[in-house]
Image: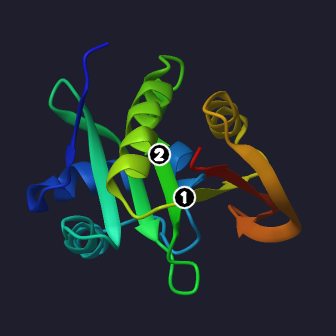
Amino acid sequence: MDYNIRRWKPTDIDALVKQMNNIHIWSSLSEDIPFPATAKIAKNYLDKFCQKGVEYDIYAIEVDNDVVGGVGFTRMKPPFSIVYQLSFWLCPDFWEDNLMDEVLDKLVKHSFFHLPVMKLVTEVFDYDDKAIRVLEKLGFEKEAALQKVALKSGNISDLYFYTLSEK
């Protein structure tokens, strides 16, 4: 499958709103993303995503010139500044195509080479089996589990922390 990994652009507002309002994507996003999302909310995120620097390294995934996913690396605050939080999402139409496996493989290697990172950490809801499989294929390991701490779509879930350290 042909795809493109690129930086987010301010003109991606409509594409981001569309994806944020996909219930299957939203159900795996952090609690700070409201549903439904508006253009104003998407603009606020894009303003942050489009910044360049060591605090954020955030990408859009395109297929046929349509934004179908995103991957972000966010530097944690001191004293954890050698740790970056990984976040990712993908349009359900591409869940079975191994697209995220390929994209994350490239970007994880890129992050360890280009960012001041020693460890990546990502949070995954216990019901997100697809994300867990992708992470485990890439060598991430479950380091912690917090039980009954996440309220999403009216359900209380466990939250898993998966990590990968620089080799």
Q: Residue at x 19, y 70 (%)?
A: 51
For residue 11, side relative to residue 137 (left or right):
left
- Of helix, strand and loop, which one carries label 2? strand
Q: Is residue 115 left or right of residue 44?
A: right
Report, in whole angstroms, how far the alpha carbon at label 1 lies from the one at label 2: 8 Å
Residue nearest the viewer, comparing 141 with 145: 141
Rendered residue at 37%/48% (across/down): 113
Task: Rate crowding at label 1 as few (under 14), some (14 to 19) or many (20 or more) other CA atoms within 10 Å.
Answer: some
Mark 1 or mark 2: name the one nearer the start of the chain: 1
Q: Which residue is mark 2?
A: 89
Residue kind at label 2, given as amino acid type: Trp
Judging depth in this view, the residue of 139 and 96 nearest the camera is: 139
Rendered view: 63 above or below 34:
above
- Residue 153, compared with residue 27, is above or below; it is below
- Residue 82 rendering spot, x and y as whole percentages: 51, 70
Query: Residue at the spot x=54%, y=60% of the render?
Result: 118
User: Which dot marks residue 7?
Assistant: none
Q: Which mark is residue 29?
A: 1
Q: How many marks?
A: 2
Task: Tell me which residue sits at (23%, 48%) in the image.
Answer: 15
Place of residue 159 in the rendered image (x, y in percent of width and height, measured from the top left): 77, 61
Q: Hey, which quadrant is residue 128 in on the image?
A: top right
Helix, strand or loop status at disc 1: loop
Extreme residue in the top direction: 1
Q: Give residue 62's position: percent from left, percent from top.
A: 24, 34
Q: Quadrant of the N terminus?
A: top left
- Which image quadrant: the C terminus? top right
**Residue that lies at the very extreme toward the bottom in this rendered image:** 78
Q: Point out the residue furthest to the front here.
A: 167
Q: Residue type at mark 1?
A: Leu
Whether pointer 1 and pointer 2 mark residues with C-beta atoms closer than 8 Å, the reply is: yes
